[in-house]
Image (spheres, helix red, strand yellow):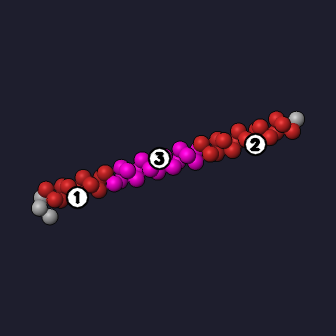
């Protein structure tokens, strides 16, 4: 019975870890999108000679 309980805890921890990793990936993607948007704006300003 104790082994089953420990397995459930491990599964829950695994889901938490996967969720945290997923959030981190989303944050990285968002950061990259913001960076790309900034580059586009900068290039646009340079093209206008500002």
Place of residue 29 in the rendered image (x, y in percent of width and height, measured from the top left): 42, 47
Q: Which residue is mark 3?
A: 26
Q: Residue furthest right?
A: 1
Q: Secondary structure at mark 1?
A: helix
Place of residue 27 in the rendered image (x, y in percent of width and height, measured from the top left): 46, 51
Q: Secondary structure at mark 3?
A: helix
Place of residue 40 in the rendered image (x, y in percent of width and height, measured from the top left): 24, 52
Residue neighbourhood size for the residue with mark 1, other residues' Cα within 10 Å, grouped as few (<14), some (14–19), many (≥20): few
Identify whether 38 is placed above or below 11: below
Residue neighbourhood size for the residue with mark 3, other residues' Cα within 10 Å, grouped as few (<14), some (14–19), many (≥20): few
User: Does the magenta portion include 27?
Assistant: yes
Mark sitting on residue 10: none
Residue at point 64%, 41% (across, down): 15
The residues bearing labels 2 and 3 have C-alpha atoms spaced at a distance of: 26 Å
User: Which quadrant holds the C terminus?
Assistant: bottom left
User: Does the magenta portion include 34?
Assistant: yes
Query: Could you tell which of marks 2 and 1 lies nearer the N-terminus?
Result: 2
Residue at point 16%, 59% (across, down): 46
The residues bearing labels 3 and 1 have C-alpha atoms spaced at a distance of: 24 Å
The boundaries of the magenta stretch are: 19-35
- The answer to which quarter of the image holds residue 45 is bottom left
Q: Which residue is mark 2?
A: 9
Q: Decide if residue 13 is on the left or right side of residue 50.
A: right
Residue at point 66%, 41% (across, down): 14
- The answer to which quarter of the image holds residue 16 is top right
Q: Which residue is mark 1?
A: 42
The residues bearing labels 2 and 1 have C-alpha atoms spaced at a distance of: 49 Å
- Main SS of the magenta part reads helix
């Amino acid at each position: 019975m104790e082994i089953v309980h420990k397995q459930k805890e491990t599964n829950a921890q695994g889901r938490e870890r996967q969720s945290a990793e997923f959030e981190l990936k989303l944050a990285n993607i968002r950061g990259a999108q913001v960076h790309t948007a900034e580059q586009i704006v900068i290039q646009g300003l340079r093209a206008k000679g500002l």
